[in-house]
Image (tube, rainbow, N blue to C red):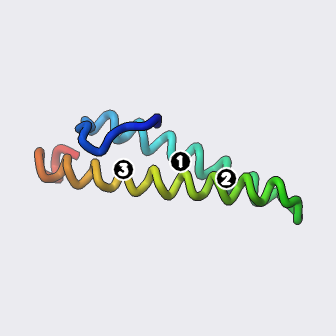
Amino acid sequence: MGNTSRLEAFTPFQLHSQLEEVRHLLNTAYFTLDGANGNTTRLESGTYAVGVVASKLDDLAFHYEQLVEQHGSEAV
């Protein structure tokens, strides 16, 4: 997703694309944690990935709210 500023407006297509990236990251985090079996490095890696996903979801929620305000929920 990169370092997108919250000031930069997303189109519905961009929002969908970013949600797909978050889905991929979340799956990666899940499988990293699922296979950790006590491996500290994998646990740290998976925990970091979950934090990245949470941050991206927070940004996407903001962009979604902006799109709804600008175009209405039907457009999103």
Q: Identify the residue under disc 3.
A: 60
Q: Identify the residue under disc 2.
A: 29
- Which numbered disc flags the more N-terminal residue, 2 or 3? 2
Check disc 3 and give the amino acid type.
Answer: Leu
| Label 3 environment density (alpha carbons within 10 Å; few <14, some 14–19, many ≥20) | some
Is 43 placed above or below 18 here? below
Q: Position of residue 67 (x, y in %)?
A: 20, 46
Q: Position of residue 41 (x, y in %)?
A: 83, 54
Task: Indicate the secondary structure of the residue bearing disc 1.
Answer: helix
Q: Identify the residue under disc 1.
A: 23
Q: Residue at x 71, y 55 (%)?
A: 46
Structural distance between the alpha carbons of marks 2 and 3:
18 Å
Task: Indicate the secondary structure of the residue bearing disc 2.
Answer: helix
| Label 2 environment density (alpha carbons within 10 Å; few <14, some 14–19, many ≥20) | many
Q: Are marks 2 and 1 in contact (CB under 8 Å)?
A: no
Q: Position of residue 37 (x, y in %)?
A: 88, 63
Q: Is residue 54 left or right of residue 75?
A: right
Q: Position of residue 48 (x, y in %)?
A: 65, 55
Q: Is residue 24 left or right of residue 38?
A: left
Check disc 2 and give the amino acid type.
Answer: Ala
Disc nearest the viewer among 2 and 1: 2
Check disc 1 and give the amino acid type.
Answer: Arg
Count of numbered marks: 3
Task: Indicate the secondary structure of the residue bearing disc 3.
Answer: helix
Check residue 50 in the rendering and tell me which mark sits there, or answer none.
none
Structural distance between the alpha carbons of marks 2 and 1:
10 Å
- Which numbered disc flags the more N-terminal residue, 3 or 1? 1
Toward the bottom, the furthest residue is: 38
Q: Residue at x 85, y 60 (%)?
A: 40
Is 45 placed above or below 18 here? below
Report which quarter residue 61 is drawn in: bottom left
